[in-house]
Amino acid sequence: MCHAAFSVILCIPFLLVGCGSKELTRPKAAELINNEYFKQANIEKTAKNLTVRTGSGHNYIIHDSESNTLMAVQRAGLFSVQLHPGVFLTSGNVSITEKGRALSREWKEDRSRVKSVNLAEIGPIWIIPTQRQKFLEVTGITTQSPTTAVTEFKWQWIRTESGKALGITEDTVVTSTAQFQLYDDGWRIMARSRE
């Protein structure tokens, strides 16, 4: 009798340790994916952005590559754009409007290049997020070994208020995958498919 009771007491710690599941579940995978790729701090790296340089003066040069962006933000009423075509270069005035100021709380302002140079006032550069990624759901998990798994998940580009003002439409739902590795402290994401 004592032998059986002693055996049960010795086995209890092993049973308790064995009961802690090391399986990667959909809710756990969703939590890890959402925290890794879709939280606000990380989303700045993966937002779709427009960049607008502001400035004015005879020598404030507008590059051809900026023309489409400037026309789009002017049509949306976010910036005032006045172009002065020259023989070789286009100069102009680009400044933020009141409507732009109202939406600028979701923008990033880079003032590192603000200065006056050769009859040109170089203003801040505005980085305008037009769409952000939103996590939707984990749709499946494939276990490759006891310590590795691949999850399939869906996410979508969501328009920001600035994106709506610019007339940008939402993209379709995107399916991605993430590779997981089990460590002694739990599951970690090792890689994500690029879209």
Image (cartoon, grey):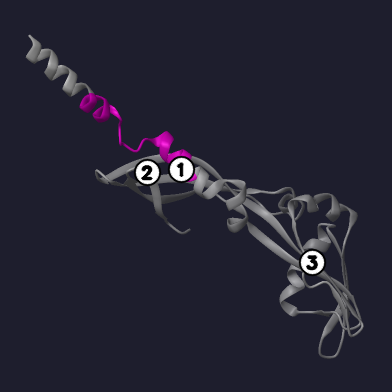
For the record, the magenta segment spans: 13-33
Where residue 180 is drawn, which disc sits there?
none
3 or 2: tag closer to the N-terminus: 3
Q: Main secondary structure of the magenta part?
A: helix
Residue 173 image position (x, y, % from top left):
52, 47
- 177 relative position to 42: left or right: left
- 175 relative position to 103: left or right: left
Q: CB under 8 Å between callouts 3 and 1?
A: no
Q: Circle 3 sits in a helix, a strand or a loop, which is it?
A: loop
| Amino acid of disc 2 | Trp
Q: CB under 8 Å between callouts 1 and 2?
A: yes
Q: CB under 8 Å between callouts 3 and 2?
A: no
Residue 195 image position (x, y, % from top left):
48, 58
- 76 relative position to 138: left or right: right
| Amino acid of disc 1 | Leu
Where residue 187 is drawn, which disc sits there?
2
Pointer 3 residue: 111
Q: Circle 2 sits in a helix, a strand or a loop, which is it?
A: strand
* Residue 42 part of the magenta-drawn span: no
Residue at 72% in and 66% down: 51
1 or 2: tag closer to the N-terminus: 1
Which residue occupies the foreground of this view, 12 or 93?
12
Q: Residue furthest top?
A: 1
Residue 183 image position (x, y, % from top left):
33, 46
Give how far apart the Cα atoms at labels 3 and 2 are.
41 Å
Q: Residue furthest bottom?
A: 87
Quadrant holding the N terminus: top left
Residue 68 image position (x, y, % from top left):
74, 70
| Amino acid of disc 3 | Arg
Q: Which quadrant of the structure image shows residue 56?
A: bottom right
Pointer 1 residue: 32
